[in-house]
Amino acid sequence: MEEGFTTWTSSTGSSYTCNHCGPLLMQEKQKKRHLRSAAHKRRLREQTNNENAPFPRGHNTSRSDANELQDQPPSPNEREIHCPDFDPDSASPTDSGCRRSSNDIALAIDGMIGNTYFEEESREEDNALPRQIDRTDWMEYEMERIRGELSLDEDDLVGSLLVGYTQNLVSRTLYDQIRSILNSLCHLKIPAWATVRRSQQRIRDHLNMEIKMKPSVWGMPCAALSSRVALQKELANPHVAPFIDFYPEDPQGRDQFKLSQSQKWLDLPSTIQPQMCINNTKHFYVFEPVQTSSNLIVVPLFFYTLNSELCAKCIIPTIQNPFRLVIPGSIHFGDPQLVVIKVKDFSEEYTSIKMNHQLLSTLCKDELFEHDEDNNQLHQIQLPNPWRTRAGGKIIRNMPITLYSDDTSGNVLKRWNKHVSFYFTLSGLPPRLSNQEFNCHFLTTSNRAGVLELSEMIIDELNSITTGGCEGYDVLISQPVLFTTSVLFFLGDSPMHAEITNTPLPNTSLNPCRMCSLSVTCQKQKHSKKYLREFLQLDQDGNPKSNPVRVWKKVIEASYDLFDIGFYSTLQEYERMAKFYGIKDHINEKMVAIV
């Protein structure tokens, strides 16, 4: 018998029970894990501290106590049921010189759960239940076993710390040298490089952190993690989820300190803004008629928080003949036509509103019309909101992100091994949390691809979450939800912004602004009064005069046009038109250089 364990042999092989933890059978490979478990160490410590104290009924006795009990004559009840108080220590087959058969073990278990075993306790308490295995101890042991399969022991942890992370990684040669020194001189057992890597891979697999490798459009290797998985984990993290703002906030010009108070979030397009809110278990969506507690029918267009209270900016629809609900088109957040209504005043959803004893959905034929004043046309909006169908009764969480890109190799290392990386933080977190390293999530990196090539690794997944949503678990309400995301801001230095926006660097460029159409045809014109006035956005009389802004749609069209010019025309013509458009597309430049 191995010290601390009792061996039980059956037709299927050998099993073991711990002398300190009770009749829990385990296999050979589970013994070492059991010895390392916190539950075993706690029981061993308690028995050591109380070895001179009397043991209560059912407690596992030590080896010496078990031998003394074997010398005592058994009671009549014990002779009747063979083994009334089943204890592996006191019934060890190796101590008695023989091994019990599987039938003997079965009889012992039957005796442990038999009715006669509990007769004495039944007399003391009429409602006493049969004594069973301690489920708390069993669950604790199982959790320790599962945790042992996923976590690192002390040696693996030391090895993982030696390997390092991000910018502090050590080479395999250096790791082997440090390992040999510590193992030989300090008598440690630092695992090999491959063992540490397997332990880290096991943790990544458990967290569903799969590293995706994919070549870029130019064949450069790129590595990426899933943005969907990262957002799911943030939503389910009890240390993060309580601090996320899912709705923008209107600070009214006071106490502005976080991104959820930005005007950009308030003015998001209708397709990516917060789509729904909840009141009294009822779900209310934007661009769906809502009936308030005062029987007023409105159409909410924006959900936001005001003075820490969820509100909606709504428009009162006009009813035309034949029955039509019409609202003005192209309304922004600050439009004076909007009415502010608290969400707690919402009463009836669109599908349950009645007018003249008829459902509103029947009267309007599930159609809402938006009036375009410029063209004097009506644009149809289908009811109910498509997001209601996609959600399937779940709450929708809006989680915009702040995307960040830069070369993360450092000013020295990037000379020969430059890594361009993408990271993101949740825009709904306050700065004191979003600035923490553990809330900054890695997305993709490459030491050979540019930022535009890398962006291909994350665009498709982000777009799918934006347009269709993704299921997650909200720890605040303890139920599955549907979450959406969008890139609210992109952060980077000036060269990174220039590459992302397909614009030249502003220092000596003829088109120095990324926001407006400020431009000159030659460098000499930068010293003229006309250029200075346009730079300051003033007219000849010194009054403010804004320059025409750049339109992203036109930038895309110009990039396509430059591709055609570079492919079918000359390099000189490509360079001339690039200056005319104020466009510098790195993908197009590589293509033209190859052609």
Image (cartoon, rainbow, N blue to C red):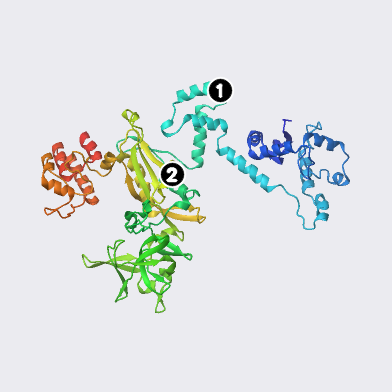
Left or right: 386 as drawn, with respect to 187: left
> Mark 2: which amino acid?
Asn
Q: Is residue 540 left or right of residue 205?
A: left
Residue 282 sits above or below residue 544 on the image = below
* Residue 348 seen in the current view: no
- Tell whether label 2 touches label 1 (CB within 8 Å): no
Residue under numbered circle 2? 439
Amino acid marked by disc 1: Asn
Q: Secondary structure at mark 1?
A: helix
Task: Name the residue nearer the viewer: 144 or 428.
Answer: 428
Residue sticking out furthest to the bottom? 356
Expressed as whole percent of the image width and height from the top left, the position of residue 297 reads 37, 72
The answer to whether 182 appears left or right of 484 in the picture is right
Circle 2: element type: helix
Q: Pinpoint residue 228: horizontal percent, then vertical percent.
A: 42, 47
587 to the left or right of 412: left
Name the residue at 52% across, 21% down: 181
Mark 2 or mark 1, which is nearer the start of the sequence? Answer: 1
Question: Dot 1 corresponds to which residue?
Answer: 183
In percent of width and height, residue 364 lies at 35, 72
Residue 32 - label: none
Q: CA distance from mark 1 to mark 2?
A: 36 Å
Residue found at x 64% / y 46%? 139
Few, some or many residues within 10 Å of mark 2 (<14, 14–19, 20+): some
Tell which of 461 and 525 is nearer to you.
Answer: 525
In the rendered view, would you say 493 is above or below 278? above
Q: Quadrant of residue 263?
A: bottom left
- Judged by depth in the image, the label closer to the viewer, 1 or 2, is 2
